[in-house]
Amino acid sequence: MASIRSRVTAAYALALGGTMLAFALALWTARRASVLRDLQVRVATLADIGHLVLTQAGMQNTPVVVTTDSMRGPELQPLLRARLDAVPGYLIVTDSLRALYLSADVRALAPDDAAELLRAVMLFTPEKRAATVTLAADELLMVARFEDGEAGPVRRVVAASSVGAAEFIGSEQFKVLVLIAPLIVLLSVIMAYVITGRALRPVDEIISEVSALTDGRSLHRRLPPSEGDDELARLSDTLNAMIARLEQSFSGLRRFTADASHELKTPLTVLRADIERAMTAGPRSTEGLIALEEALQETARMADLVDSLLTLARADEGRFDLHREPVALVPLVRDVAETAQILGEDAGLTVRVEPLEAATVMGDALRLRQLCLNLVTNAVKYTARGGRVELSLTRRGDTAEFAVRDTGIGIAGADLPYVFDRFWRADRARSRSAGQGGVGLGLAISQYIAHAHGGSITVASRLGRGSTFTVSLPLAVGATAGGEAPPEQPRAAASED
């Protein structure tokens, strides 16, 4: 397979050769037309000279035509013939029916050529004064001059000259161009090959650098920045950006694999220990039942983890199917609020639902409920006993906003960019060792659900002062807002034990 350098050089050679050929043809055509015009002017000048000789003789009352031989008929007088013989080229003087004078060049033609020339001469009219005639060995350009009566019986003065001279001049120029064109093309191809090689040298360097990125461990390397703002510089910048994204993806994949392995290893270890303890204690002992109950809990937790991983895997592959239909958010939020009330009572929290504004979106009701439940569960999970969780639903323009506010432990500002990453939990505050469950996939799933519905999810938080998660979803086109939903009365949370 030919390289770009070879293909560019070949294309340049073809373009240059074709351009030179077209230039040579155009030059030859223009030069030939110019020579023919000059030839026509010269032939017309010869006809004018013959006309002038005859006109001067008529003005001097000198007989123009004499008859010396009754068999031959009238002809120009010898003095005029001698003057016209001095005019070069082909010259013919005729009356209305026959030739009165033939120059030496005409008389030297073969009989057939001479007859053909005379037939062409007799066809001239005052409207047709120029023509070409093809003889056996040449082609002549003829120009006629019609007399106005001052030259006696003379009707036409016709001069002619060979077109071969014009053809010869154009052909010689064309031959010269054809001879020097290969040399010019060869030199140009060599220069193009060298210039193309120098221009593509940075591409070879880029290829060498990219070839060195053989695995995920060398993605920290970058292409050297190119000077200027040409295509190669933009290519280097684009490749560097792509490598940076690949490095981030590989890093996320390694982190994801490590976190998933860790999250699966812990319940499997607990599950194994519980099963072994149950087998040792016997099937009907209290200790065995407790061990089996713990094993069941770990199995349920592991099933939730696998289900979350499967959901995210399908989302990454674009197989996150949504059953879209008009969904009224007020009933959905009220349902989630009831769950929050139950969770809040068990955790000793106050759950308050602000007045809900009616809103309808196009989406999957089950997925939207999952999104809202994830946010409510997180709020309850990370809010200390005696705290408060607030839910709200408002309309802002063509979007509906569902917000969950809590007075929990909050999130540090440095951790906010990572809250939606998979398996993310901020140090001790978000770890199971601090008394909180979960594996750090809920917010990642919530974010994808929001994006899949054409919306977004944002977080605002301060460490120790609580967090606010806000979901924005586009309203359904043509959906009516309806009346304002009646406000929910806050329920008092269960007092602490």
Image: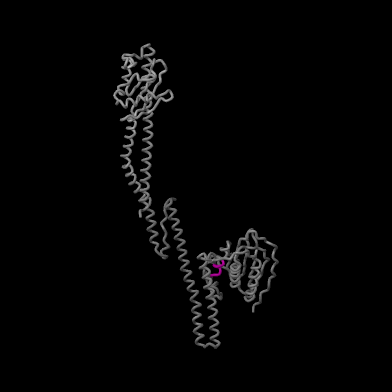
- Expressed as whole percent of the image width and height from the top left, the position of residue 72 reads 32, 17
> Which residue is pictured at 45% across the width and 56% down the height?
238
Residue 28 drawn above or below residue 211:
above
Q: Image quadrant for the C terminus?
A: bottom right
- Colour theme: one colour
> Can you say whether 462 is above or below 57 in the image?
below
Q: Is residue 273 visible?
A: yes
Task: Please check the rendered image and state whether residue 402 is part of the magenta-colored stretch, yes or no.
Answer: no
Q: Is residue 9 above or below residue 255?
A: above
Is 68 displayed left or right of 446 in the figure?
left
Residue situated furthest front in the rendering: 71
Expressed as whole percent of the image width and height from the top left, the position of residue 235 reads 43, 54
| In the image: residue 272, left or right of residue 36 | right
Q: Looking at the image, can residue 49 be seen?
A: no
Pick the residue in front: 483 or 50: 50
Is the stretch drawn in magenta largely helix, strand or loop? helix
Tell whether 307 sits left or right of 481: left
Q: Quadrant of residue 294?
A: bottom right
Q: Which of 422 and 326 lies nearest the eye of the viewer?
A: 326
Looking at the rendered image, the quarter that the N terminus falls into is bottom left
Magenta span contains residue 443: yes
Q: Is residue 397 above or below residue 330?
A: above
For the image, the number of numbered tags is 0
Q: Nearer the viewer, residue 253 or 146?
A: 146
Q: Residue furthest top?
A: 61
The percent coordinates of residue 89 (x first, y second) are: 32, 24
Q: Nearer the viewer, residue 405 or 420?
A: 420
Residue 172 is situated, as x and y percent measured from the top left of the image, at: 31, 34
Residue stretch in magenta: 441-446
